[in-house]
Amino acid sequence: MLTLERRGISRRALLSQAAAVGAVAVAGPGFIAAPDAAWAMETKAVDPKAMATLLQIARDIYPHDHVADRFYAVAIRGHDDAAAENPAHKALIEGGVAGLDALAEAEGAAGYAAVGWETDRVALLRKIEDGAFFQTVRGGLVVSLYNQKELWPLFGYEGESFSQGGYIDRGFDDIAWL
Amino acid sequence: MSAPFDLNDESVVVIIGTGAGGGTLANELAQKGVKVVALEAGGRHLPEDYVNDEWASFSQLSWLDSRSTSGTWRVAKDFPGLPAWIVKAVGGSTVHWAGASLRFQPHEWKARTSYGAVEGANLIDWPIDAEEMAPWYDAAEKKMGVTNTNGLPPLPGSNNYKVFEKGARALGYKEVHTGNMAINSVDRDGRPPCQQTGFCFQGCKWGAKWSTAYTEIPRGEATGNLEVRENAQALQIEHDASGKVTGVVYAGPNGARLRQAARAVCVAGNSIESPRLLLNSASSMFPDGLANGSGQVGRNYMRHLTASVYGVFDRPVKMWRGTTMAGIIQDEARHDPSRGFVGGYEMETLSLGLPFMAAFLDPGGWGREFASALDGYENMAGMWIVGEDMPQESNRITLNADAPDQYGLPTPNVHYSDHPNDVAMRDHAFRQGKAIYDAVGATRTFPTPPYPSTHNLGTLRMSERAEDGVVNRFGRAHEVNNLFVSDGSQFTTGGAENPTLTIVALAIRQADHIAKEMAAGAL
């Protein structure tokens, strides 16, 4: 999971090694973290700056304003795991991020994550939405984001109910506003 | 006390598949004293194994072997490797079905006569009718414990149903109720009543929903006449020089190739695997596939119209609570060509959990328009549309000779394109579904495209004349006297109704036919 401490290094020391990548994350050697260090995640294969950019991409694909960045960080972690196993996956992710950065730079920004407004970032994503990189990221994200049990309560979804005896005595027909 | 039969025992009936068709047939034959070996490609999962978790359950139960798709249907774009969402386990798709158990309407048995010629549709009448099927439906409803039949009370209405019902009444719909469900509304047949748990599609952990996995199969086994072989994938049906089938070659649990001799073979592997098996059983006597002299094997694949409508309201609905599909509006199921299409459709309550809603609401969708829809998840109500789609010769199962499976056999391709009648009916249903939710104050509604097919039909259809189909009025192959089709593949047309009750009724009737034919020495 996401850890706040990394191999005994303090939060302050960790952040001192990091550089901001847009608004949602900082990237340091072998990790990305929240700008306020509320969460941190080790990276083992994908370049941390690319992972930080991927986090912004994930939020722009499925933007839920009431969902914290750490859920998106969990959702993209599988790409780092896959990249560690498979060089082609590492190339797909890092190449895809580099391609998006180049599109952003052509518009005068210092990379995708540095594009300040969601509308402008989404316009860049629209240009690549039929490509393998985008399809891989979106197709993975629709499972890895929404299948997090910790996220379900934020949408009101209650998940498993058998162990609680179902809803027969817990409001299956409790709608009162009709 | 399941009796192990010898591989060389030529007296057994071999049934391929243990779902609504195969599982029912296996028990019915066993009860009549007929010896049966049932080959089931999947393993045995029972209620204690089922999980209230959509993706975990999907991995546990689904048929995930390699398949491809083609045609203009949106499933080919959204889920190119998953044309169908069906189960690979003892019990087949009765493990994950919703329980809706509806009879065909009388006119639907005679689609060609009722609808006339429809350009581009390969319509024929069934060789059987409502009157002939009535006693078999009676038997199926009794076996399955269908609510609102045989004095069984209806299921109570959930939140999702109450929204649906209020909108339906506002539009003037009359035939609105909690359905004819093969889910216990009272303690019955050794199984408890529904506990409103949700997760009907993930296998009922209470066993309140009828499934052959824990009703027909163990009862058949208890007779000593039924042996179910799990993890046994049928590969080929063999025949002798006279054209009678003699046995089934299958891959056992460890991959070893085995051959079970057979007195008769009944195919019930669902409408993709069943025709695939016949096509893969081609021989010098049957060069285009077993029993395929008509060229109709694999053709006329139907999958019901299907679509969904979701409405978002300003207050919570919590549609996931309770029985998933216990709610129906039947007013649009009639045949009324003034609506711009032939045939009709049912509207039924439906809900998905958040993970599947994200995957299926608008496959491929993203960005704020998509995400904001899911933000309204707690306030959503949902319905499914099940309508009659037209049989078309070009909608068919074919073999990918260049893409073998783990046993070296060609994998199936599923080709499907909507008929204009399907499109017109779906558009009508989308409008009506939206109007229902608008009438209750929906702030936003969504037309959701078809999911991977759960109702797979046709492909080995029943016909009066041998040249029009593959099997006769008893599901018996026109060309092969001791070969039967026992699943939804034999459907001549699809009707507007969820198909399981009809599959079960046909299986009970087929068992009666097989037993009589055996007694008469004709099989």
Image (tube, coloured by chain):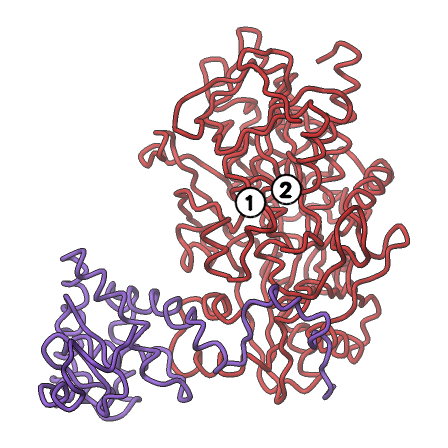
Chain colours: A purple, B red
In this rendering, the answer to whether B500 lies above or below A62 is above
Q: Position of residue B261 (x, y in %)?
A: 55, 14
In this rendering, the answer to whether B414 lies above or below B8 is below
Residue picked out by circle 2: B213
Q: What residue type is disc 2 on?
A: Ala
Left or right, B249 with reference to B379: left
Residue drawn 50% across the image and 52% down it: B417
Left or right, B408 with reference to B464: left
Displayed quadrant of residue A120: bottom left
Q: Position of residue B361 (x, y in %)?
A: 50, 70
Q: What residue type is disc 1 on?
A: His
Alpha carbons under labels 1 and 2: distance apart? 8 Å
Residue picked out by circle 1: B45
Q: Quadrant of the C terminus of chain B?
A: top right
Q: Position of residue B371 (x, y in %)?
A: 43, 80
Q: Are marks 1 and 2 in contact (CB under 8 Å)?
A: yes
Labelled disc at residue A156: none
Displayed quadrant of residue A6: bottom left
Residue drawn 84% across the image and 69% down it: B174
